[in-house]
Amino acid sequence: MVFRYGIITLFDCASQHILLTILLSLTGSFAFARRY
């Protein structure tokens, strides 16, 4: 039970990190396109 919860938490953190990275890259590309 604890092991399963740990895996779920790990995947949740990983998905949040991936979403954050995608958001940052998207905003960065938008700023780059707006600048040039």
Image (cartoon, grey):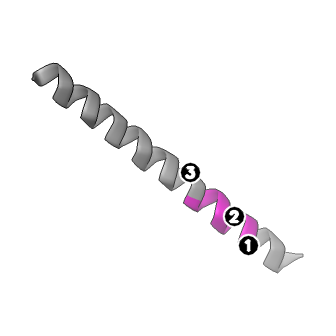
Residue 20 versus residue 12 in the image, above or below: below
Query: Which quadrant holds residue 36?
Result: bottom right
Q: Position of residue 28 (x, y in %)?
A: 69, 64
The segment highlighted magenta reads: 23-30
Task: Of the two numbered discs 2 and 3 on the same chain, state the one appearing first in sequence.
Answer: 3
Left/right of residue 30 with respect to residue 16 in the rendered view: right
Task: Of the two numbered discs 1 and 3 on the same chain, state the one appearing first in sequence.
Answer: 3
Magenta stretch mostly in which secondary structure?
Answer: helix
For badge 1, the amino acid type reads Ala
**Residue 14: image tag:** none
Residue 35 versus residue 27 in the image, above or below: below
Quarter that holds the N terminus? top left
For badge 2, the amino acid type reads Gly
* Residues marked 2 and 3 touching at CB (< 8 Å): no
SS at circle 3 = helix
Q: Position of residue 7 (x, y in %)?
A: 27, 27
**Residue 28: image tag:** 2
SS at circle 2 = helix
SS at circle 1 = helix
* Residues marked 2 and 1 touching at CB (< 8 Å): yes
Q: Position of residue 9 (x, y in %)?
A: 26, 36
| Residue lying at 42% horizontally and 39% vertically, measured from the top left | 14
Q: Which residue is mark 3?
A: 21
| Magenta stretch holds residue 13 | no
Label 3 crowd bin: few (<14), some (14–19), many (20+), radius 10 Å:
few
Q: State the CA–CA distance, disc 1 to disc 3.
A: 15 Å
Q: State the CA–CA distance, disc 2 to disc 1.
A: 5 Å
Left/right of residue 13 with respect to residue 18 in the rendered view: left
**Residue 31: image tag:** 1
In the image shown, does 1 or 27 lie closer to the viewer? Answer: 1
Label 2 crowd bin: few (<14), some (14–19), many (20+), radius 10 Å:
few
